Amino acid sequence: MKTSPDFWNQPLSAPWKQVPLVRDARGVEWEQGAINRNPLKVRERLERAVDHWVDRAREIPHLSKLGAPLPKPKVLYDLKGGIAGMAATMVRPRALPEQWIRIHPDLLARYPVRMIQQTIPHEIAHLVIDWYLPKVREPHGPEWMGVMIWFGRPPLAFHDMEAAPSVRGRAKAAGAPLLFEAPHGRR
């Protein structure tokens, strides 16, 4: 199986599952080659992907009749835990709506191809539904699936990337007592 030779210029439709996974000396999983990439350049590539998917969303037939063009969201690199990405739209009275995507920086560093080719279109699809169909309440419903199919991406609700063990997780594994453990997210 051939892998993409050039991370920086690969088409966004390339199959991300073809990128081999490797483990470092600590047993942490990485996409092959990711450990040597400049994190700032990976973020630049991710933001170019955001532009690409927003442009693709603006091409969806009939959506332009439902409202103003989808704006480019802000990108924040502040997620933790096992969540790869999160999209949000904030609507306030007498103000323009704001949209943003939150990204898990550690998962981006370890799985840049998966994050760029699957997580970003996944989150942009949420923003499309929030922007044009705000009354839709099912996050991974048929409308969201339709956008993902329009993008040519599989409509997967969950990722398969390993979250790095947290300090709390390592302490628990070592037998250290915990005063409080937050509940896990649903799956």
Image (tube, rainbow, N blue to C red):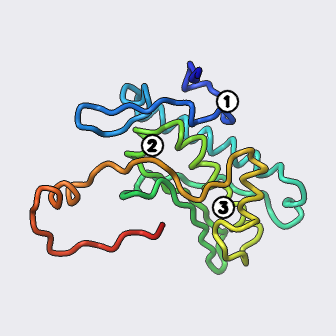
The numbered disc on residue 11 is 1
| Among the two numbered marks 2 and 3 on one chain, the one whose residue lies closer to the N terminus | 2
Total numbered circles: 3
Q: Real-space Cα distance between discs 1 and 3?
A: 22 Å
Give coordinates of residue 35: x percent, y percent.
36, 30
| Among the two numbered marks 1 and 3 on one chain, the one whose residue lies closer to the N terminus | 1
Tell me which amino acid carries mark 3. Leu
The outermost residue toward the front is 1
In the image: residue 39, left or right of residue 2: left
Nearer-the-camera pick, 60 or 157: 157
Q: Are marks 1 and 2 in contact (CB under 8 Å)?
A: no
Give coordinates of residue 77: x percent, y percent.
43, 51
Tell me which amino acid carries mark 1. Pro
SS for callout 2: helix
Q: Which residue is mark 2?
A: 108
Give coordinates of residue 141: x percent, y percent.
70, 68
SS for callout 1: loop
The outermost residue toward the bottom is 93
The numbered disc on residue 127 is 3
